[in-house]
Amino acid sequence: MATKRSSIGVDTSDKKSRVCMLSFEGEILEETEIPTSPSGYTRYFGRQEPALVTFEVGSHSAWIEEVVHDCGHDVIVANPRKLALISESNHKTDRRDALTLAKLAAFSPELLSPVTQRSPDMRLDLTVEHARNALVDERTALVNTVRGLVKPTGARIPKKISTHAFHTKAMEHIPPKLVAVLTPLLTVIGELTRQIDHYEREIEKLGKEKYPVTAHLREVAGIGPITALAFVLIIMDPRRFKKSRDVGAYLGLVPRTYQSGESSPELRITKSGNTLLRRLLVGSAHYILGPFGHRQDSDLRRYGLALIARGGKAAKKRAVVAVARRLAVILHRMWLTGEHYEPLRNANRREAKRASA
């Protein structure tokens, strides 16, 4: 970065953003509020001398970065998950947050854990994934509602009815006295299913036309067009990670650690990083370990089943997370190297080693 006269910290909210300008000697030069809008940011930052501007990643951060950068400033987009100094402060205010961001950028920028934001095209394409996911959540909630409303009558809607076919097949199991009441819900579920299908066709089209690497990632059983595209759009560039194993931690698929003295308890995963991609990978892991996973024997499936066979509390849940974590590593490695997926790569190597011994 070029030498700057000041460090500017910005604490954003939907309507107003708190701004603190700090000299690199630690003197507060200016504090103010500006509208959280492109015009408001352009008016303020357009009249400032080039500075180092810092704000946290969030719903406004993409357009803010573009506007501030176009005004001639260097930008750091901070990762709020890494800023306990702000999020866990006992005296949290917008003014303090803006000042803290300015100080960290000026004197300890590495503590901000800067993030790289997606290009406008990638953000737009990822919106399709998020829109589909929102409809899936709504449909799941309504399906569960219908099932719950039927139970008090003594009837049950079989679990074998898929969510996709629920709006047509569930009616066969609804008591006559509830048909008029629940038909509107089933109609909405049917419409949600049609819209979800529309998004899924769009996702497959995006993968084929703009992100051909998704076809490569789909060599792995359990990885479909939705998960493959989400992986590419969320990871953005495989070269961001020094090691493929880092992807699991980036997506929050590794256990928390809290080692103190002789104590080192087994904790839950961190669940940091992107919720959508973590959820999709966990879904793929369920497929790999489930009844349809036997269609392609693989190191992943064998590994997960071995963990389940050990038994113990929550063995299945731990196995699913472990398979999802390894799946993230494999997908990253395939993308980075261009190697084709070998389902039984490790097993074949062990057999070849035993044969040569």
Image (cartoon, grey):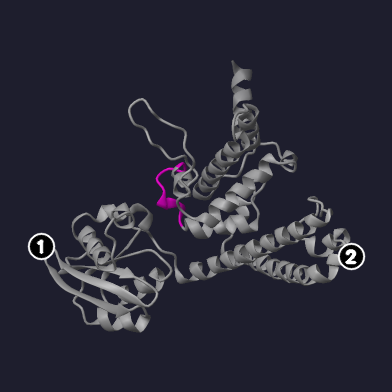
What's the amino acid at mark 2? Answer: Pro
Q: Is residue 214 visible?
A: no
Question: Looking at the picture, how far across and down is residue 143, in whole percent?
Answer: 72, 60
Q: Is residue 246 left or right of residue 185?
A: left
How many marks the image carries: the answer is 2
Q: Is residue 88 left or right of residue 124?
A: left
Question: Looking at the picture, how far across and down is residue 214, in whole percent?
Answer: 59, 56
Q: Residue at x 31, y 68 (%)?
A: 11
Graded by Cα atoms within 10 Å as few (under 14), some (14 to 19) or many (20 or more), the crowding at tag 1 reads few
Q: Quadrant of residue 47?
A: bottom left
Instruction: State the quadrant of the N terminus.
Output: bottom left
Q: Which residues are magenta?
A: 237-245
Q: Which residue is mark 2?
A: 176
Is label 1 in a helix, a strand or a loop?
loop
Q: Which residue is mark 1?
A: 25
Q: Is residue 248 visible?
A: yes
- Marks 2 and 1 in Cβ contact (< 8 Å): no
Residue closest to the eye, 286 or 329: 286
Graded by Cα atoms within 10 Å as few (under 14), some (14 to 19) or many (20 or more), the crowding at tag 2 reads few
Q: Measure the alpha-carbon separation of dots 2 and 1.
A: 77 Å
What's the amino acid at mark 1? Answer: Glu
